[in-house]
C-alpha cells in the first residue's frame, strides 16, 4: 500500500510540473482560456497532493521533500494568479 501512495504522490508531482509547463506555453500565446483552466487544475492538484501527503505513512525526509515541493509550487501558483 505504501508503494501505491508513493506512486500517487510521484504522479501528482509530475502532473503539477506538466500543468505548469502548459501555463508557460499558454502565456506565450496569450491563450486566456487555457491559462485559466490550467491554473484551476494546478490548484486542484496541489490541494490533492497536500491531502495525500498529510495522511500518508511516509518517512520524515520524504515528507519534508513533499512539503518543500508544495511550498514552491503554491508560491508559483500565487505569482501566476496575481494580475500583472
Image (cartoon, grey):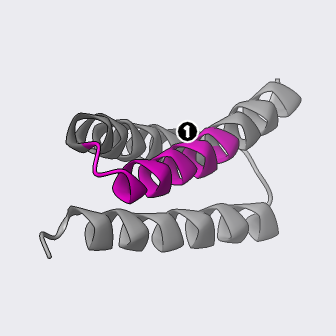
Question: Who's the residue at 70% across and 31% down the image?
Answer: 8
Specify start and end residues of the magenta stretch as a single range: 13-31
Of residues 37 and 75, the one nearer the viewer is: 37
Asked which quadrant contains residue 27, the reply is bottom left
- Outermost residue on the front side: it is 29
**Is residue 15 inside the magenta stretch?**
yes
Tell me if residue 33 comes above or below residue 73 in the rendering: above
**Relative to 9, is 82 on the left or the right?**
left
**Residue corresponding to mark 1:** 52
Give how far across and how far down residue 14 sits, in percent: 69, 43
**Is residue 82 inside the magenta stretch?**
no
Classify the position of the N terminus by image quarter.
top right
Asked which quadrant contains residue 64, the reply is bottom right
Of residues 3 and 82, the one nearer the viewer is: 82
Give how far across and how far down residue 29 sits, in percent: 37, 51
Give how far across and how far down residue 19 sits, in percent: 51, 43
Question: Who's the residue at 55% across and 39% down the image?
Answer: 52
Question: Who's the residue at 75% across and 42% down the image?
Answer: 10
**Relative to 69, is 73 on the left or the right?**
left
* Magenta stretch: dominant secondary structure: helix
Amino acid at each position: 500500500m505504501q508503494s501505491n501512495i508513493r506512486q500517487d504522490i510521484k504522479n501528482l508531482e509530475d502532473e503539477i510540473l506538466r500543468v505548469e509547463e502548459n501555463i508557460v506555453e499558454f502565456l506565450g500565446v496569450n491563450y486566456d482560456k487555457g491559462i485559466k483552466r490550467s491554473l484551476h487544475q494546478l490548484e486542484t492538484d496541489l490541494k490533492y497532493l497536500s491531502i495525500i501527503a498529510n495522511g500518508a505513512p511516509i518517512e520524515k525526509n520524504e515528507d519534508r521533500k513533499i512539503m518543500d515541493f508544495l511550498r514552491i509550487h503554491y508560491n508559483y501558483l500565487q505569482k501566476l494568479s496575481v494580475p500583472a
